[in-house]
Amino acid sequence: MRVTSEPWPAGDWRRLLAEAVGDADELLALLGLDGRVRSATPAGGRRFPLRVPRGFVARMRRGDPADPLLRQVLPLAEEDVPAPGFSADPLGELAAPPVAGVLHKYEGRALVVATGACAVHCRYCFRRHFPYAEHHAPGGGWQATLDRIAADPGIAELILSGGDPLTLSDARLAELARAADRLPQLRRFRVHTRLPIVLPQRVDETLVEWLRAMELPTVVVVHANHANEIDDDVRRALAALRATGASLLNQSVLLAGVNDSAAALAGLSETLLDAGVLPYYLHMLDPVAGSAHFAVAESRAAGLVRELAARLPGYLVPRLVREVAGAPSKLAVDLEV
Ligand SMILES: *Cc1c(COP(=O)(O)O)cnc(C)c1O
Ligand code: SF4
C-alpha cells in the first residue's frame, strides 16, 4: 500500500472542522439508520454534545447500529444511568485544578493543557466533565507557561495535551515550538492529539513546516481505537507526520463494543504498523460518569492482552495501563490475574 506523504493543502481543516456533524438525527440519517436506532438525547448529550467530522462518519459502516466508530461518538440513553464507582472527576483533577495551563503530573515531564477544544467528542472521554475553558493556557501567549517550565531544570519533556492541541492555530503552535527549542533543559517535545485520525486534513503544509523545523526530537501520540479509523486519508496524514522526522505512537482505550476482542486489537496494531505507528498504551476506561457501558473488567482485559501477546510480536502489543489519581505514573495492569 503506497500512500503519498505530501501534507494536505493549508487550512482546509478549519472548514471541515466547522462542518462537523453535531446532531444525532443527522448522523443516523447519514448512516441509513434513522428509525432503526433510538436517537437518545440524554442529559449528558446536552452538556457534552455529539460532535464528529464528516470524514470520520464516512468510515462508519452504513446500516450497522453496532459500528465500532459510531459507538464511540453517539450519545446513548445509557449515559444517564448512574453506575457505582463512576464519577464526574475520576482522576481528582477538579479538586486540585491545574494552574494556568501547566499540569506537573509526571516526573521530568510538564504536561501543558493547551486547549479545551476537540474535533470529536468521544463518549468515554475522562474529561467530558472537565471545565477546560477555565484552565487552558492563557490566550495572550505562552510566556507564563514557558517561564514556569524554565524555572524547573528537572523538566526534560514538554507534553502538549488538551483537549486537542492541534485545534490551536499553527501560528500559536509554531511560537511554542520555537520557544521550546530555545529551552536548554528540554530533550523532547511531545504532542498528544486525535486530529490526525479524526480530521487528517489537519496535517497540512503549515503544520508540517513548523514541525519539520523543530530541533528537539518530537513524538506525536495519536489516538485510534479500531482499525476502521485508519483509511487512506489518515495514512497520508501519518506519512506526512513521519516525513517530518517525528516518532509516531498510538494510545487507545479498551472499550466494550468497540475493540474488546483479541481480533479487533490485533487488527488495530497491524493497521497502525502499516501506517508507520507503534502501539504504545491500551488504557483501561477511566470510571467517568456516563461511560459505564464501555467498561471492560480488568481480568477480561488482561486475558485479551495475553491473547494478543501470543499472536503478535512484542512491539505490536500495547502496554495495558490504568490511571490512578495521585499516582506518579500510569500503573501497569497485571496480566496474570
Ligand atoms: C499519561 C499521560 C502522559 C504521560 O505519560 P507517559 O507515561 O509519559 O506517556 C501525558 N499526557 C497524558 C494525556 C497522559 O494521560
Ligand atoms: S479526542 Fe481525546 S480529549 Fe478529545 S474527547 Fe476524545 S478522548 Fe477526550
Image (cartoon, rainbow, N blue to C red):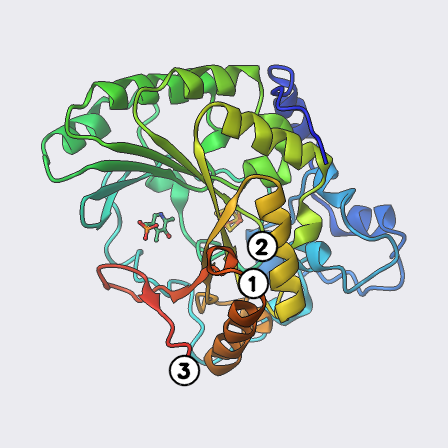
* One can see residue 17 in this view: no
Task: Identify which amino acid the numbered label 2 is placed on.
Answer: Ser
Which secondary structure lies at badge 3?
loop
Q: Nearer the viewer, mark 2 or mark 1?
A: 1
CB atoms at circles 2 and 1 under 8 Å apart? yes
Task: Identify which amino acid the numbered label 3 is placed on.
Answer: Glu
Instruction: Measuring from the top left, give residue 319's x and y in whole percent.
Output: 42, 62
Residue at numbered disc 3 = 336
Query: Where is the N terminus found, in terms of image quarters?
Result: top right
Task: Quadrant for residue 110, please give it.
Answer: top left
Residue at numbered disc 1 = 312
Q: Is residue 4 left or right of residue 195?
A: right
Query: Where is the C terminus found, in terms of image quarters?
Result: bottom left
Which secondary structure lies at badge 2?
helix
- The CA distance from mark 2 to mark 1 is 9 Å
Instruction: In the displayed orientation, state which residue is furthest to the bottom.
Output: 337
Instruction: Measuring from the top left, give residue 209's x and y in whole percent.
Output: 47, 14
Instruction: In the displayed orientation, state which residue is furthest to the front.
Output: 313
- The CA distance from mark 3 to mark 2 is 22 Å
Q: Is residue 19 above or below residue 255?
A: above
Q: Earlier in the sequence, mark 3 or mark 2?
A: 2
Residue at numbered disc 2 = 269
